Amino acid sequence: MVGREKILIVDDDAKMLDAYRRHLKKSFDVDIAKDGELAMTMVGRNGPYAVIISDFRMPGMDGIDFLSRVREASAESVRMMLTGYADLNIVMEAVNEGYIFRFLTKPCKPDDLHGALEAGVRQYQLIQKERELAESRRIQSVLQQAKDRLKEIVEERTRELMASNQRLQQEVEEKRRAEKALRDSREILQIAMDNIPQCIFWKDANSAYLGCNRNFSKLAGVEDPKNIVGKTDDELPWPYAGLLKRYGEFAMETNSPGFEVIEEFDEKAGKTISWDAGSFPFHDEEGTVIGVLGMIEDISDEIASEEALIRQERNESIGKLARAFYNELQEPLMAMDASRDVLMNSRKDNALYAHAKNISDQVAVINQIALKLKKLAGVTRSR
């Protein structure tokens, strides 16, 4: 037994239509129409119908024209025709051209009509299933195409991700090597700076320390160079930190390096300390001053050594000059001493004696000078 479906019966015989409906309403949902125009309206308004049965001979629009229009308006509906034997050839032509699924001759027995309708309903349901199957196959095809495309996209994305991951790993490895090289270079630079006698430091534009070498941290009273990072000169225990702040700010403000020997009296040590200071501004890529590199060194001992050397060289020069004068005076003095003795024995001539006495006095003065030069030369040599 087939499922309950809607059917439409078209006939200009009202009594026949009522008889069909009474007989078929237990098995089907039956609609009736007395002509083709009304039937077409019902197809558009109440359709789709599983089976549409039309009488061949009707006023206005015959059955073939009506079913031909139904074919266009509701292609899946199964079309049947009721006809007499006189119209058999015309109806057979319509069947062969595909207009009609089956035709029935009048008068049609109720059981024959019922059986034909069941066959038509089965045909309609088969068409529906084929349509659904075709739609399902189409959807499956679309889904398969989408699946294949998705697979291609996934494979493509997987390849891209693998390539990106490989590039990322390479970048990470390169970055790791670069960071290690940077750390190594910083360590080497720090070691190099920690083993030079000068005190090195560098600050940002706000005069906060970015780093220093070990000699500077000791000088500034900070145990570990790392502990100076972020501090300002006002936070350092070193009493001369103000010097670095003043000269560092001046170098950044003028955007020029500065060199100067600074002397400060150390009350604790009771002596003047000489500092050799230098400040060098450094810049970003746009040339803006972003900090200062500084150097400071205690050169008090060096200056003291240089002054001692200068004094020694001066004394040695004076000693050499004194010895030279003394040696040069010996011979004239000996001659003058001899002349003085001769003149001093000539007491008979008063004028000559007076002259000799003057010479003798001058010789005595020169002898005193010679003795001082001799003493000066001797003292210089003894140092």
Image (spheres, rainbow, N blue to C red):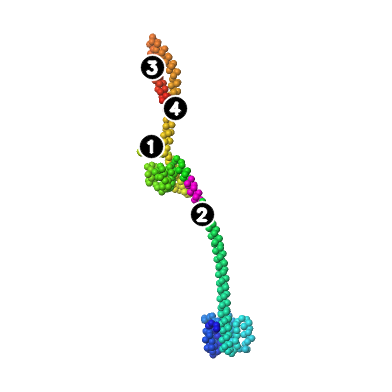
Secondary structure found at label 3: helix
* Residue at which label 2 appears: 172
Q: CA distance from mark 3 to mark 1?
A: 51 Å
Q: Point out the frontmost of discs 2 and 3.
A: 2
Amino acid type of the residue that numbered disc 1 sits on in the rendered structure:
Thr
Amino acid type of the residue that numbered disc 4 sits on in the rendered structure:
Ser
- Boundaries of the magenta span: 178-188
Q: CA distance from mark 4 to mark 2?
A: 71 Å
Q: Is residue 357 magenta?
A: no
Of the numbered discs 1 and 4, the one sitting upstream in the chain is: 1
Image quadrant in which you'd find residue 95: bottom right
Q: Point out the frontmost of discs 3 and 1.
A: 1
Secondary structure found at label 4: helix
In the image, is residue 351 above or below residue 269? above
Q: Point out the frontmost of discs 2 and 1.
A: 2
Q: Quick check: marks 2 and 3 in contact, CB under 8 Å?
A: no
* Residue at which label 1 appears: 272
Q: Quick check: marks 3 and 1 in contact, CB under 8 Å?
A: no
Amino acid type of the residue that numbered disc 2 sits on in the rendered structure:
Val
